[in-house]
Amino acid sequence: MTDLPFAITLGVGSSLANHTGSWRVERPEYVARRPPCADGCPAGEDPQRWLYRAEERGYEAAWREIMTVNPFPAIIGRVCYHPCESACNRGQLDEPVGINAVERFLGDEAIRRGWTVTGDVPPTGHRVLIIGAGPAGLSAAYHLRLLGHDVTVRDSGEEPGGMMRYGIPAYRLPRDILDAEIARIVELGVRLDLRHTVTDLRAEAAGFDAVFVAVGAQLGRRIDIPAGDGARVLDAVTMLHDVAGGQAPQLGRRVVVYGGGNTAMDAARSARRIGATDAVVVYRRTRDRMPAHEVDLNQAREEGITVRWLSTLTQIDGERVRVEKMRLDDNGFPQPTGEYEDLPADAVVLAVGQEADLSLLRGVDGVELDGGRVRVGPDLMTGRPGVFAGGDIIKAEQTVTNAIGQGRRAASAIDAYLRGRPTPPVPSSAPATFDRLNTWYYADAPAAVTPRLAAARRVSTFDEVIGGLDESTALFEARRCLSCGNCFECDNCYGVCPDNAIRKLGPGLGFEIDYDYCKGCGLCVAECPAGAMEMVPEQARR
């Protein structure tokens, strides 16, 4: 026999000749963990699933993956504040993946190429009435139609979209994009009754098997501030609605906006675009307590809008407002200081919150209100069987993305109700945390920067401010995904296994472990970049 090198006692191929699997006390297993981006998405998307397809240039397949959950990828790609990116593990490595920008690219590509969705499910014979053609109502209509139900949407507006049309300015959401994605839903066979104000739910619901109420919060909240006879005061919701409808109010050159949310930012930025040369936002707390998102505040400042922190309005007269300086107490609440200052103002826009008109629910047995919101159960059904509610009229985060997610949840619950089945549970899995990743396998790849309209041009036009990614940049951004917690077939486990116990199943099918030969050394688990493997005690498997 040929002499073997020092310390080698077994011949070549012995791992396959001997069933070494009996040596182990632990065994590796492939796992599928839930990526943090999926946990962070209020609409219920799993971005990793469609990013995986996009990075292989399967753009239509990626778009269709999104459409199983969210019928508005081009819209969400513009107006969502992307909590998925805040949760992205890559943010702890360099910068989060630009999930929102890639979703926008896919949505725009679908519109450009004319991709459509068809409903091939046989009709169920059930009729569902949806009140409100905003993001929650239209999302529910889309999913219910795909489930085979007959759907009618009624809305008091001239055009569908709700606050997507009348609350979000065109410089954030161009109307051709909004119209294209709504048209796709209507083409599925959803009936749309516009200029139809519902005042009596019981009368309107006759002939329908279920109702989803999603009228939104389209009333601006009023507050009591002493005002002179010549004061020009309006609420931000009405102002944005009028601007969107082509009837912009005459505000004058100097405009004061009172409030600190995203609506306040939109009102101030819109005021600049319709003629104001001086727009000031007055907010009674500090920046760290301001509800407006950072991106909106930064863009507003770039456009010349100023913010008066720790200030509140105490008096509104014809051409000025009186502002009292505030201070925060030990609990973070603003307290008056007795120090005042006058600011010139031709108009004051109040952006201090929104309310819903719920008069249509008056007298409906079983429907209960709680602080101006409709009380619902986990399945979004009210106390009256067959009547569901969602969107801004229930206690939840008031964003387009969340409303879209609620529409989908409502559709699932309504479908279960109509079929006499329990609402399907939401599947859960262990989270894919950053500490499970082998990040040194991934090359440095800073996030792509989306193009923006120059600030000097913005204030004279409602043209879109933030541009989209081109194909090459979107492809690069999709490929920055770390595939947290899920196998992407990198072959690391296959390459490092000393026992040849990892077997390829073919493209897209992953791997399997031959436990007759696996000794349980754990190399495959230690070297998995995505944290898609784990060691489990052997005795637990026998």
Image (spheres, helix red, strand yellow):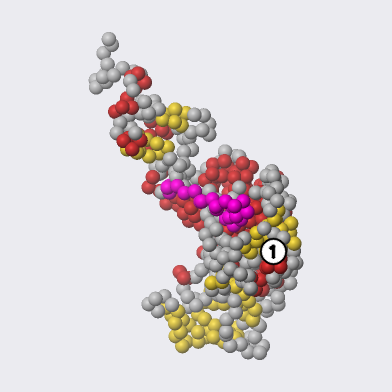
Give the quadrant of residue 314.
Answer: bottom right
Quadrant (top left/top right/bottom left/bottom right) for the N terminus: top left
- Image position, residue 160 (x, y; %): 71, 61
Decide if residue 505 is in sight here: yes
Is 196 inside the magenta-drawn segment? Answer: no
**Residue corresponding to mark 1:** 205
Q: Is residue 214 left or right of residue 96?
A: right
Question: Quick check: 47 above or below 275?
Answer: above
Out of 33 and 126, give the one closest to the viewer: 126
Element assignment for label 1: loop
Decide if residue 304 is in sight here: no
Question: Who's the residue at 62% across and 51% down the image?
Answer: 419
Q: Residue furthest top?
A: 1
Question: Who's the residue at 50% across and 45% down the image?
Answer: 481
Q: Amino acid at mark 1?
A: Ala
Q: Residues within 10 Å of mark 1 (few under 14, many from 20)?
A: some
- Image position, residue 447 (x, y; %): 51, 50
- Image position, residue 541 (x, y; %): 35, 35
Question: Who's the residue at 70% across and 51% down the image?
Answer: 125
Give the quadrant of residue 529.
Answer: top left
Q: Is residue 58 left or right of residue 17?
A: right
Magenta stretch? 409-432
Q: Is residue 534 left or right of residue 403?
A: left
Is 424 inside the magenta-drawn segment? Answer: yes
- Image position, residue 134 (x, y; %): 65, 62
